[in-house]
Amino acid sequence: MISCFSSVTNPDKELKETFDVRSLSVVGAIEKLINTFYPTHFLKIRSLRKAFLVIFVCFFLSGTNFLEAKNPSPGSNRSLNSNGNILTSQNLYSDSSSQNSPIKNEGNPTFTVLNINHQPSYSKLTQNFLRVSSETTPINALLVPGLEVAFVDGPVYVNHIRETVWRRIQDREGFLNGDALKTENFGWIVVCFNNLGLVLVRPKSTLSFSYSQAPSIGLKIKLLSGSMLLSGENGNQIEVEGRNLNFNFVGGEASFYCDGKSDLLKSLKSGVYYRPRGASKSISLKESYYVEIDEKGKESRQIQFNTDMEYEEFRRLAAYLDHFKTAIKKYSTEIQYRVDTVMLNGKFVSSLETDSEGFRIIDSGPGPVPRMLQIKMKFTPYPRPDDNFEIFINKDLVYLLKEGREGFYEANIILPSFPEFNMKVHYVNPTGKKEKIFDCSFSLLSKARKMADIRDFLSQLSNAFSRRDTIYLFDRISPDYRDGFGNTYQDMVRSLEEGLRNWRDVRVDFHPHTFEFKDDIARVNMNYRVTALGENWDWRYDELGSDLMTLHYQNGKWQIKAKEKGLFFQTIKVSIDLRLGILKGRVTDEASGHPLSGAIVRLINKPYHTTTDIMGDYVFYNLPVGRYNVEITKNGYGKISISNIDVYATGRKY
């Protein structure tokens, strides 16, 4: 838009007229030219003014063919792709009968390819129309090349240089050098630059655009207040100036906030370089990190943030951003790599267990924790010689993937000191542009950590018994459960339901002391104590013992796969008569201290006998209260007798 001044018949009043360069009509142009070169007081007679205007139009039509000029406007948003075609943004409501076929995407802006064989230019006669303050200025110096409104919604206003009035902006409108833009409440706008970059502006923002003559910088944006998001491809550098910092945007995505006191810069993709006001060197801001600088120049440390939450702030313009990326990829000549196979220490990453937080579990097994991790990857298509791939471990370690055997790219990395770490793989093209193609988080499951996890699991299991949480208990029993008595998962479920229904104040405490690991299986020797109140709250059952529990780590959690002593409430069920007692013990080798299984234990002068299990334990249920003598025998060992063992009632007054 260009502002022109002309005199009218009333000498005491000036009329400020504004017209659009791209939509300049012939008659309007000639009339403005007449007002420029001829004093209006000679044309006060209306009929004479009309006649003179018609003659002047005929004169120019007979000698100039500028009306048939086919040169496109230099303010239109166009840029050449690799095939010599021009990419141009097209409004959603453009004529569907156009020769060009826009990409079909209902509800989104479209992008079209045009074929042209000439560069934009303007004739000298047209340039004579563009007079500002009675000075002739070439149009190429006024318009910002390639900058155009792609979408506008709500109250958005533009102010041209040397103007004092803010005017409502329109779709497909271009910008002059130095134009200011303002969005009011509920005002959103998307500005396209050379079809390689988008500027998304949120409500209550004020900024200005200018064109830089420097070959490395095409567009300069000054944000006075508000917020915006920039998205673009490499090779389309934009310089952004805030109150307290400047940064150069060369590609990727970044958001910028200015509240008048502090500037906040967030790197969403590929990273940016920023420079605090007054500083001479630029500082790198990594992807998914932000930095804030206040009005006193105090700079915060770089802090990581969730990029998805930042995109949510601009969700009103998400459709334009997504479709812009799709159009760029369609016409891009760059190769889009994807990761097909990932192996970690000889194991496929896709086969590793996943915990509840989404971390892939690296199980070191019973041996020591490995100090090195070997990463092997396959990419599709097969990479070119000049393409590189980098592995980022957390935010500090960077490794280069090198071509290996059998089509793999390999790297040996040092195991991080933290048990959890994040690994990202970036494709780096010959120009230095980085694109993330793989992202995964891992958790190292060492023997010490397994033991800590099992202790925590048993503690949670005890709490579930206390609060009678059957949902948690059922979920922690493996579907393929099988114990030494032949009980299955269904038997365990029925036993838990019946026990918690018939007994009150159930308490089960576990005290593990020995761990054995093999792959994702753990065998845990433990002591336990089970206490419960009778149904009438008058007798309490109390049992101490030991057990061998087999745990299986699957689906990101530990589950009980087997239990040597059977069901949790099995002994309670056997000794249901609380007036009787229980006699139990353990038989061990005197020399080695190892438990003896298969030893025969009988009560002298009583019709009761049993054998010890693999833990060397024996138990007699429902014995009458009294004093007993025990005899223990085993092949290869001598006979031992224990006298005067008192047996009391299992239940006792509570």
Image (cartoon, rainbow, N blue to C red):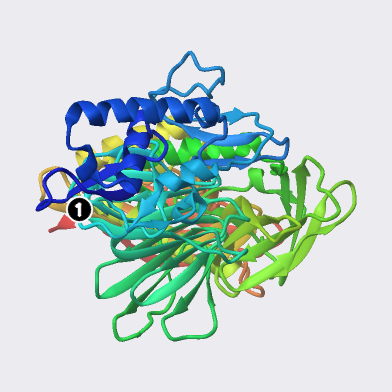
Of residues 5 and 425, the one drawn nearer to the viewer in this rendering: 5
Q: Which residue is at the far top?
A: 97
Asked whether residue 583 is in view, the answer is no
Q: Position of residue 391 (x, y in %)?
A: 68, 62
- Residue drawn 72% across and 67% down? 399
Asked whether residue 412 is in view, the answer is yes
Q: Position of residue 406 (x, y in %)?
A: 89, 47
Q: Which residue is mark 1?
A: 165
Which three-letter amino acid code belongs to the residue tagged 1?
Val
Q: Mark 1, residues whose alpha carbon is within 10 Å: few (<14), some, or many (≥20)?
A: few
Using the image, determine if residue 64 lies above or below residue 352: above
Residue 262 appears left or right of 515: left
Of residues 324 and 2, the one drawn nearer to the viewer in this rendering: 2
Q: Position of residue 556 (x, y in %)?
A: 50, 48
Which quarter of the rendering shows the C terminus? Answer: bottom left
Q: Quadrant of residue 45?
A: top left
For label 1, the SS is loop
Q: Quadrant of residue 472?
A: top left
- Residue drawn 30% across and 49% down? 4
- Residue drawn 67% across and 34% down? 85
- Residue drawn 37% across and 35% down? 30
Using the image, determine if residue 67 lies above or below residue 125: above
Q: Position of residue 257 (x, y in %)?
A: 33, 64
Q: Which residue is at the far right?
A: 405
Residue 8 appears left or right of 70: left
Residue 337 appears left or right of 277: right
